[in-house]
Amino acid sequence: MTQNTVGEVFLIKTSDRHTGIRSLLSQFDLKDYSGKRTALKANFNSADRFPASTHLDTLGALVKGLKEVGTRDLTLAERSGMGDTRRVLEQMGVFDLSEKLGFKVVVLDEIDKEGWMKIDRDGTHWLRGFYISKVFLEADKVVQTCCLKAHRFGGHFTMSLKNSVGLVAKKVPGGLYNYMWELHGSPYQRRMISEINKFYDVDLVVMDAIKAFVNKGPELGDVVEPNLLLASRDRIAIDADGVAILRSYGSTKDIMNGKIFELEQIKRAAELGIGVKSASDIELIPLNDKSRETADKINDVLKSKG
């Protein structure tokens, strides 16, 4: 895992996902994606509408952007935590979009044991280790798109780090052990979430924060409208900015209290070298005039409570 010295996070204030995501992608040199097998992880934990789940316009804009630079064998792989994955993807229109735009969809609940890689428990808080989908381990590039939400079931917040839970097996074929029961019943849940991220690389994260849940979550909550899209190569940096955004609106006590880099998900991820180690390592880059005031507010939160 390569540790970043500076975590660049690009920010644009807009409600237009197509032009906003195009602007974000233009900040990255995507020539290296040409001809590469690319795995895509979205947020389809349930069949609840955005901001509970990835907005279909966000997924479509991201797929179009990746295909324009010549990415090969673009595959979205998903495991829903609330509901049947195939049914969730059907209800959310993902299969229809895949036929329209020409990308593959893999329902992770339906793959055989050979499609999973066992990660040993050594150095983690997982009692038996866990299994990661080989879709993400064997891809040349991994792209993730997440939402901005509080999480009332022990995660405290769910952004890019927490989104990685959806590429871990609930059960492996032929096995009885439920890894999600362990995760959600453990006092170490937030550390375990971060530990998943140590074992696979992410090349790009796009966060759709046009709307957000400031409490409850992940499938419901009080909604605010930051009208923001963010992108980064650094999962810690973009999640820290996400926490700062939630704090600027007022959120749950678990999100509001203490230093951002002392929150367990972020602290453990930083210990593992997944991304930046402190708020001072984050460079937030606004892409239009409307974004500058918001960027200043986020930076103020990071400076005072990072």
Image (cartoon, rainbow, N blue to C red):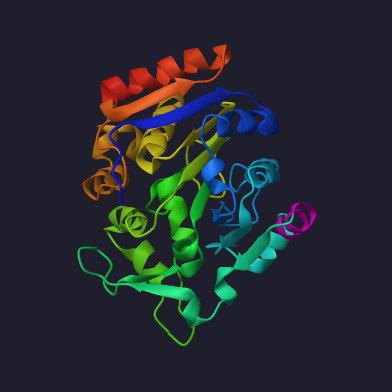
Q: Measuring 30% from the left and 52% from the top, which residue is drawn there?
A: 1
Q: Measuring 49% from the left and 53% from the top, which residue is drawn there?
A: 142
Q: Which residues are magenta?
A: 94-101
Q: Position of residue 283 (x, y in %)?
A: 37, 25
Residue furthest to the bottom in view is 174
Q: Measuring 64% from the left and 48% from the top, which residue is drawn there?
A: 70
Q: Is residue 181 left or right of residue 18?
A: left
Q: Quadrant of residue 266?
A: top left
Work out whether residue 38 or residue 171 is closer to the camera in this orientation and state it.
38
Q: Quadrant of residue 192?
A: bottom left
Please tell me whether residue 252 belongs to the stretch shown in magenta.
no
Work out whether residue 62 or residue 182 is closer to the camera in this orientation and state it.
62
Residue 182 in sight: yes
Q: Is residue 122 above or below residue 70?
A: below
Residue 146 in sight: no
Q: Position of residue 306 (x, y in %)?
A: 28, 28
